[in-house]
Amino acid sequence: MKAKEILKPALILCVICLLSTAALAGVNQLTADTIAQQQVITEQESRRQVLPDADSFEEKDGYAVGLAGSETVGYVFVTSSKGYGGDVQVMTGITADGNVSGVVILDQNETPGLGANAEKETFRSQFQQPAPENGFTVTKSTAGEGEISAMTGATITTNAVTNAVNDAIKEYHQVKEGA
């Protein structure tokens, strides 16, 4: 084998890699602002979904206050917990009087058809009840007040979402105590 037979294809491959990298970097640069704007829009829509009585939201240190006019109607917290496929990021709305008004899964990498079912309204709506002082507990049977029914085959994901909501409840109590 001659050096030319090895160097020529290697050099061509190197040039192709450099051009591909430059193209990807350029596309990333061009779309960064659009992606950031889309994330802001998604976050605003999620806030309205978890705290529908709020007209506007005021950013605080680590949470948002939902306002109807000048009256505080609730709070929105973003928390996460370890699931089966990594961290599960959850947005939780809690009314000023302590009821969980909504839960949205912002980010998850759970198993499709099992843990990913946490995004379904039938699962998320279980949290819409008064926030228990010590948080929700997971049960494998029909849930009562303060309990969440585990998704079949996805107990780890159920626990992750419940733990994230419970963290939001803890933050809510800290905010209310500090007010």
Image: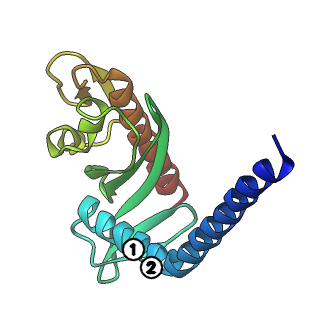
- Which numbered disc covers residue 34? 2
User: Around disc 1, counting alpha carbons within 10 Å, would you say few (fewer than 14), some (14 to 19), or many (20 or more)?
Assistant: few
At which x and y percent is residue 84? 43, 28
At which x and y percent is residue 118? 27, 38
In the image, 167: left or right of 165?
A: right
Specify the quadrant of the image occupied by residue 51.
bottom left
Residue at the image position 75 percent from the left and 59 percent from the top: 11
Q: Is residue 76 above or below residue 124?
A: below
Quadrant containing the N terminus is top right
Q: Which residue is mark 1?
A: 38
Residue at the image position 35 percent from the left and 68 percent from the top: 42
Specify the quadrant of the image occupied by residue 88.
top left
At which x and y percent is residue 152? 21, 21
Q: Amino acid at mark 1?
A: Gln
In the image, 69: left or right of 164?
A: left
* Of the pair 91 and 75, the residue shown nearer to us: 91
Residue at the image position 22 percent from the left and 66 percent from the top: 52
Q: Amino acid at mark 2?
A: Thr
Q: Is residue 25 above or below residue 169?
A: below
Q: How many marks?
A: 2
Evaluate if marks 2 and 1 touch, with contact meaning CB atoms under 8 Å apart. Answer: yes
Element under disc 1: helix
- Which numbered disc covers residue 89? none
Question: Does any portion of residue 133 appear in the rendered image?
Answer: no
Element under disc 2: helix
Residue at the image position 47 percent from the left and 48 percent from the top: 79
User: Around disc 2, counting alpha carbons within 10 Å, would you say few (fewer than 14), some (14 to 19), or many (20 or more)?
Assistant: few
